[in-house]
Structures are given as C-alpha cells and as structure tokens.
Image: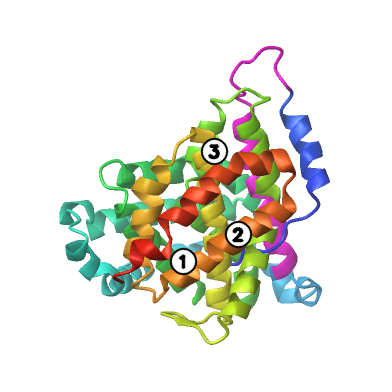
Amino acid sequence: MTPGLAATPYPEVSALKSRLAQTSSPPSTSQPAQSSVPSLAALWAKKYYTSVTSVEKPSQLANNRNFKEVTTTEGRKYTAKKLIDNLTLASAQAWSMTETLLSEEIRRHDINPDLVNPLEIAADTRHLFQKVLAAYAERSTPRRLSVIVGKDFGQVRQKYTSIDRRAIGFVSMQFHYTGQKLLKWLSPPEQVLWKPYLKVMDDHMYMPLQAAYEAAANHPYDSPALAAVRHLLPVSSKIAVSVCQKICHLHPDYKTYSGSLHEIQVKTASIRDVEMFQVYLCLCVLENHIQSVQQELFPLCVMLYPCLHVKWKLVQDMLQAMGWQIHEYLPAEPMATFLPYLRIFSEMFAGEVFQND
C-alpha cells in the first residue's frame, strides 16, 4: 500500500517464548512489568531481522567475494561515508517527491503549514540517518540498532504528532524516499547488507513501536492484554504475508500509485502496512482505548491512501483477511482480547463511512 521495505515470515514462536521467559520473569505481586519493554522490543527486533536477512542474503551472494568485502569494518565505513556524503542530496530529492505527492493535502485537510516545515523535517531525517550510519559503521547489528535508535525515532514521532498527528505522514514519506534515494548509490552487495538497517528505521518511523513499549510497561506481568500482544507480535509478519497474498488473489489487476500489487515494491510495502495495522491494534489493546487509531492511523490513511491510489475496498478486504488470519494463529483467549478492537477497525473503515468517495 504505502511505500516500504520487505517484511517476511517469522521463525519459530517457541524460540521467542523461550527468550521472552529469559528476559522477563514474573513479579511476585501485580507490579508494572517494566521488563516487558525490552522484551517487546527484542521480540520485534528479532522478528524482522531474522526474516529480512533470511530473504535478502541468499547463499550464493553470501559467498561472493564482494559481499565479504563490504561486511568488513573497512567496507562498512566506506559504505557509511558514501551514504553520508550523499545524504543532503538524497534528502532534497526526497522532499521534492514528498511535496509532489502530498502538498495538496495540506490545504484539503486544513493542516497548519507551520507544522510541515521542509527544512526542519529534512534536518530531523538527516540526524536519524547519521546516527544509524554511525552504528552501521561500528558493526552494530540490525537487532541492536532497534535498541540504539528506538527512543530517537520515538522522540521524532512525538515531536510531529504532539500537535497534529497527521504531520507524521509528511515525515514518514520524506524518510522513506530518502532511504530509497540512498540505495541508488550502493552496489548490490552493499544494498543487501544495508537494507535490514533501513527496515529497522522504516518500521520505527511508520509504526508507533515506542508508544507500544511504553504502554506495555504499565501492565502487570500477567496482564491479558500483554499476553495477547506477546502472542501476536511473533506471528505478525506471517499474518501480513498471508493477508497480502489473499488481497493479490482478490484484486489481480489492481494498480496503485507505485504499480501493480504483484510488483515487489508494492507487495513489500503492502506487507509493511498490514504489520503497521497490527501494531496499532496492539497499541489499542495495551492502552485500552482507540485514541491512537482515531487521532493518528485513520487520519493518516484518509490523507495518504487516496494519493497512493489505494481504494477503501482494498483496505476493507485487508482488514477482513487480517482478522481471519489472527483468528487462525492465536489461541481463543488472546483472540478474545483483540476481537473488540478488530470490530472497531472494521467499522471505522467500512464502506458506509466512505460512501461519497
């Protein structure tokens, strides 16, 4: 749906449950489970790191001499410097694309233009990229990167959503297009090594991950809401892939702003979007209300999807397929926790809401 990077199936859930048990022991009383924050962060980080590297690093490329060279400390520093040297140009090109796509939305949605300052957005984008590239050059893993930059991305999201949450749409698109422009300066082996880091950044910018971690910290260890989220996160990528396969089957000839649903760029973006909806679903459960959807997700969809030629029927079919897939993967108790919010999602995006569109 919206542009993004690959999100692919997750490994065995049992291994994750074992790690979760090691990193978070139950408290003796009903105290807030502060350890749930690193647990959920580790759960998410391991999920996409394992899935991305298993797909993006085929064996024949891993044995390639050029690939081995770019993985060395010197190779990583060379790649990082190349990207930093081109970061300002990529950022400028990205804003041109963002402005072309969304400039009319400022007027149409009556967004205060002062909240969409291109110089400030570009500066914040460059700062985040510079911090990630420094970690990349120091050989930090994508999984570790989620811990290193998670709060920084959370702060940027908070900055742009504190007054009008729709402003994050401009930041997200600017950030995404900057990453895509930077890829053009990299060789195929460098792209393979860099893409998992780019996905960490993309996910943290598009999804309210930090908000979910903070909400989880307010729950006791045995909270049904926290247990439900722990069940869903490990399988969210598998669910997203299955949902997008279903949508491609239902709409074989559908074309978005970026191309056919079957094209890799659109397909991987769609998978990321389904994961995004699941993260917002988790946030609703953890916060016990739908404010994040009412004030952020729904307005963003109303602003972005028409520009990207995503029809509401596509979103409605996605939500229906997502609900069935969650039902298939989750036991009865966590499913019961998510069900009221799944119904609210369906009602908010129902055809009756957009009957004049």
Q: Amino acid at mark 2?
A: Met
Give the structural element (helix, strand or loop) at label 1: helix
Badge 2 density bin: few <14, some 14–19, many ≥20, Cα 10 Å: many
Name the residue that disc number 3 marks.
285
Quarter assignment of residue 118: bottom left
Name the residue that disc number 1 marks.
179
Query: Which portion, as a residue range, is magenta?
Result: 26-55
Q: Amino acid at mark 1?
A: Gly
The quarter in which the C terminus is drawn is: bottom left
Percent x, y for residue 138? 60, 50
Q: Which mark lies nearer to you, 3 or 1?
A: 3
For residue 103, above or below residue 149: below
Q: Is residue 108 left or right of residue 27?
A: left
Badge 1 density bin: few <14, some 14–19, many ≥20, Cα 10 Å: many
Percent x, y for residue 114? 17, 52
- The front one of 201 and 21 is 21
Name the residue that disc number 2 marks.
322
